Amino acid sequence: MSDDITKISWAGKAFSKLFMRIFFKSVHGWKKRVPDNTQYFLETGIDGSCLEGAIQESKILDIKGVIILCHPFLKYGMHYFFKNNMDLQLLSQGFHVVSFNFKGFGSSTLKGHAYSDDVLSIGYLIQRNYPNLPIHLLGCSFGGFHLCHALMKDTTPFSSVVLDSVPCSVNAFFKTGILAAAMKWASNSKLSQSVGIRPINHSLEKIGELPVLYLYGDMDKYISQLDIDNLKRKCKGLDFAQFSGCGHLEIYKKKKQCYIQIIVEYFTNSSFGVHF
């Protein structure tokens, strides 16, 4: 695993955690019980954060693998997947499903300064619990953004990745004003890699042969064609799928059957070293 976390100064860590507490205050701390068909867990992350999550085991006899779901920037956190029944769709396809809350969301505590560490912490947990099954990642928007930076630190636990509606840069969300200027500076500073706010191509171009599929809607206001062209140019190994008539986080909502079919085929094929 990368030692980037040891290179950031105490001031950088303090700045990052303060930013999380202030800017993310509106979405932090929303709590709700997980569905009855889940195995609730608490896991101490590699940065000391206590991460809550839920494991759902498929009843299908021929288990294809485990999918870890990384939630978008919404107060519901991992409950985003329960609310839209994405967990049930994937269970019915023969995958165990793992959902978790990033630090600060739900009952997950905010100790460290990089959300990418949360992804790795859950990956290591599932690797210990299911050593003989391939582990796949599905990251939506915010969750997918930090998933990318986790991959630069360590791809070992994972067999393949699907990114859904993931902005290529934090600047996509901060376009004007003082905050935009601050985020633009931070995303290009020495802090950026350690706290996970650099553009995703900086991480994706360093992950070797790991299969990664990037899904995006042609009406997503946070992803421009210039972003896609840049990502294709810098990250040669990525696979892409565009969905017409879809805005941000609308692909599953508007084209559910196609969405599930594509990611299931990608995860299944990548387990055998094949991807498109």
Image: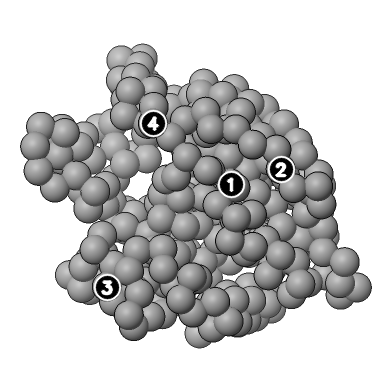
- Residue 27 picture location, percent across and down: 43, 35
Q: How is the image coloured?
A: one colour
Disc 2 marks a residue whose amino acid type is: Val
Which residue bears the numbered disc 2? 34
Report, in whole angstroms, how far the alpha carbon at label 4 lies from the one at label 3: 26 Å
Which residue bears the numbered disc 3? 219
In the rendered structure, the answer to whether residue 126 lies left or right of residue 176 reads right
> Does label 4 or label 2 sit earlier along the sequence?
4
Element assignment for label 2: loop
**Quick check: can you spot residue 39?**
yes
Front of the two marks 1 and 4? 4
Which residue bears the numbered disc 1? 78
> Does label 1 or label 4 sit earlier along the sequence?
4
At x 32%, y 69%, the residue is: 247
Front of the two marks 4 and 3? 4
Residues packed near mark 1 inside 10 Å, few (<14), some (14 to 19) or many (20 plus) = many
